Image (cartoon, rainbow, N blue to C red):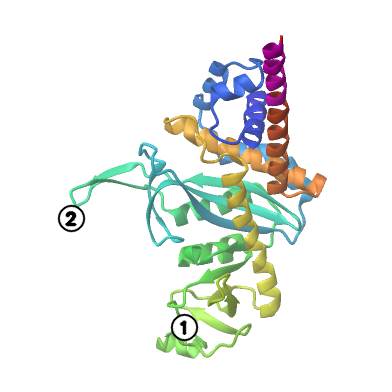
Amino acid sequence: MNNTLDLYSDYLIVQNKYATSTGLSEMLNGAISHDKVTRFLNKEELTSKELWRYIKADVRSNENSEGALILDDSIEEKPYTDENEIICWHYSHAKSRQVKGVNLLSCLVNYGDISLPIGYEIVHKDIKYSDVETKKVKWKAAITKNEHFREILKQAYNNKVLFSWVLADNWFAAKENLEYIHYTLKKNFIIGIKSNRNVVLSEEDKAEGNFTKVSKLDLEDGQSLKVWLRGIEFPMQLIKKIFTNEDGSTGVLYLISNDLIHDADYLYLIYQKRWNIEVYHKSIKQNTSLAASPTKRVISQANHLFCSLISYCKLELLKIKTATNHFAMKHQLILKANQASYFELLKLQSSLAYKASA
């Protein structure tokens, strides 16, 4: 499997349209057959466990005690692909509506300049039901995204990944997630929180139930307060940050952390590492052919996605060696391919001109 995995994941980096078993075979002049690639994609589902086996040595060689686990999900839209249990309808927070595609929950470990995926889950909506109001057949997941979130963290902990921080946005600020990180993992978290969450500023107010919404608190930009979230026993530090969007508008970010030692500036600095997972999402979509699955079968679609993550790992390790980012490397590969195609075209034109003059 390893040889085929290496060939296919390399192919996902260098190709620039649709990945196919035939395309890989032709690129290698038949050194690997179309059938062998197809069998590899359909043999057995490759999972988060295989990803960890692949990347473990590189994680160990880069690890340090200030590592951060960064978790987030992303939807790769596939509006024209037949619906199944992984290509289905999901709510997009970015678009505030349902979109059809693959919903991928990933976990990166960040050590300074390097960020490597160590776990992931594809959201499977494997339960079919009939909507009472619309009478339409719909799909739902047997395992919630927050349950996947905790399971991925559990895998990282059991694999003895070295980290001090868990970073995520406000979609993962569920009570069960915060308590799991605090009580079970005994790690620090910095997680976004919605402005409508209820908090109190003292144990006395907590006992009396005098909760107020986060948005109602008198907090300045960069200021923090010690608070208790409704339903959670341990105190946390709430931080407010005002930021400017690309269009010039301003937004407000609220962060919650169980670290009561460091100040707000330090915690916000740590939280900015979360941006690495946004770069990861962009890279797997643009540089490793995530959406270019060659098949309509669930198992081969899932295995193609796995190979796309392996391709990302390769680019990330090359980034460290070459001091060149993923997008610049992809650009150079496409440029070289275009140059080779152009010179091949010149040869053909030269041959045609020679025949015409003979």
Q: Position of residue 342 (x, y in %)?
A: 69, 30
Please say whether residue 266 is one of the residues in the magenta stretch: no
Quadrant of the snapshot with the N terminus? top right
Give the residue at x 59% y 73%: 257
Q: Which mark is residue 21?
A: none
Q: Is residue 73 visible?
A: yes
The quarter of the rendered structure image containing the C terminus is top right
Q: Secondary structure at mark 2?
A: loop
Q: Is residue 261 above or below residue 70?
A: below
Residue beneath the point at 52% across and 20% down? 39
Pick whichever, 49 or 299, lies toward us: 299
Instruction: Give above or below for 11 relative to 216.
Output: above
Tag of residue 133: 2
Three-letter code, disc 2? Glu
Q: How many marks?
A: 2
The percent coordinates of residue 68 (x first, y second) are 67, 59
How would you rate the neighbour count of disc 2 (Cα within 10 Å): few for under 14, some for 14-19, many for 20 or more?
A: few
Of the pair 154 and 49, the residue shown nearer to us: 49
Looking at the magenta stretch, what is its main secondary structure? helix
The percent coordinates of residue 233 (x first, y second) are: 50, 76
Going by the numbered disc 1, the residue's amino acid type is Ser
Query: What residue does disc 1 label?
Result: 215
Tell me which corner region of the image, top left, top right, bottom left or bottom right, holds residue 5.
Answer: top right
Q: Residue at x 63, y 47 (%)?
A: 118
Tell me where the magenta segment starts and ends, as one range.
345-357
Find the distance from the CA under tag 1 to the CA under tag 2: 35 Å
Could you tell me which residue is drawn at 42 percent across and 77 percent down?
A: 196
